[in-house]
Amino acid sequence: MVPYRCRCSGGLITTLVAAVLVCGAVAGTMEVEYSWVYVDYTFASPNHRESAIKSGKFIPENCVILDVDIFQGPSEEKLYFNMGSNSNSAVTKQRVFVTVPRIKPGNPASVAEIVPGDRPSSVLLAPYPNWKANTISEDTINCNDTIISVFRTKIDYLGRFWIVDVGTLDQFDITARSVCPPKLLIFDLKNGDRVIKTYKFPSSQVKDVSLFTNIEVDIRDSKGRNTFAYITDTTAYKLVVYDFKNDESWVIDQAYFYPYPNKAHFKIKDVNFDLMDGILGLALGPIIKNDRKLYFHAFASIRESWVNTNTLQNKSLFQNGLIDGCGTFFLSSEVRETQSSVQVMTDNGVLIYASMDNSLGCWNIQDPFIPKYTHTIYKSDKDFQFPTGMKIVGDKVWAVSNQLQNQFTTMVINRNSVKYRVLVGRVDELIKRTGCDKRSAYEDIKMPSNVQKLYPSKDGLVFSGKIK
């Protein structure tokens, strides 16, 4: 944790509100929930593991955890443990998933579920949904049933697990190759991990340089039938929209998705590298008057953009390629201090974004996107090097840091140091006494009367109508 304190000057502060807004506060904290020196899997036996290492199918230093997501089982799915005097206490079932994209040879599984040990650094990964689905065949790859490589995932309010398979192997290696068309897999975590749908993206929507790296899911009814997924094609600078109800997709081409050449250089912990990556960070705003904004930015960028999702869902607008985005797509007039990777948004419109200076920042959408209203809420040069995955689950932020910069260099890395971490922090603790938390300054602040909020329930997703 790094404290952020201020010095007050220039006169007497007469109210608590003024003190909060002028002085700021100590930043929040992110605790390390899980950590790894090197990733390891639940092999059938020590002999199977040793055989995989000898054959080159498992090279631990090439396995990088990139993203995390959490499924909190519904109230009727509870595990009961013998807790002595409180033996009837119920603990809600929680499942934690991570992605391990096949960016280099020697990765036996790309989607996995954490199997906790007795301490944070002793966790293993169990391939999801099983070993068979993650095993790359020696001869012919079954593109329908095999998970090739996954960068990020999304678990929605209804317990559907959305997995975007990029279909490429060894992305960061000279042997990089595309072996299957990109596809979308949707699993039902509430019903035995059954496959709800498999969707292959049409070849016309995939370029030679395409890499589908992130996904956001937009549910518009309580049963989840009217759902859209927004998927970033980071290296072709496109956004792909998938319509769940009609089982179709289309590509959106906009200059707003492109990187800034002068922001393609990065330096993390003395490692210099260049990445000309376009649109990557995605976050959905609250529903207002039956519409909501998708906030986004390119990785090689220090600006934020947004667009109404009703626009993205209008397939006919984008049938002829690039359109004039003026007045439809919007770009912040001012900038962040440094590049940002992933981002999330709270139900009441606080954007939390991961920055390449090993920090988390926040911004409240009620304010202009200018430096005055962007706040650093956490920073750690040790625990938060190169954050690449982030979710909000309940009242907590979950994030992944993985020192990915070391995959771009031949520098000798300390083999015994912790490299991959899953960190967790409470949203209210992270943003309290910053300008992002309007409640900290105005105790009785109310959301706009036309803002709808989503609530998970036993029967699916409930829309509250208006917040009063």
Image (spheres, rainbow, N blue to C red):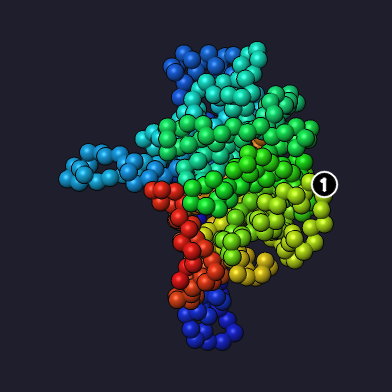
Q: Considering only vertical position in the picture, is 188 above or below 321?
A: above
Q: Considering only vertical position in the picture, is 450 above or below 93?
A: below
x%, y% of residue 156? 51, 46
Q: Considering only vertical position in the picture, is 352 above or below 214?
A: below
Residue 419 placement: quadrant: top right
Residue under label 1: 320
SS at circle 1? loop
x%, y% of residue 2? 53, 58
Visible in this render: residue 418? Answer: no
**For this rendering, which residue is in front, 58 or 108?**
108
Residue 407 placement: quadrant: top right
x%, y% of residue 78? 31, 41
State which quarter of the image contains the C terminus.
bottom left
Visible in this render: residue 89? Answer: yes
**For this rendering, which residue is in front, 193 or 47?**
193
Pointer 1 local density, CA inside 10 Å: few below 14, some 14–19, many at least 20: few
Amino acid bearing label 1: Asn
Q: Residue at x 75, y 35 (%)?
A: 206
Q: Considering only vertical position in the picture, is 152 above or below 310?
A: above
Q: Residue at x 63, y 13 (%)?
A: 138
In the figure, is residue 302 to the left or right of 190? right
**For this rendering, which residue is in front, 461 or 247?**
247
Count of numbered labels shown in the rendering: 1
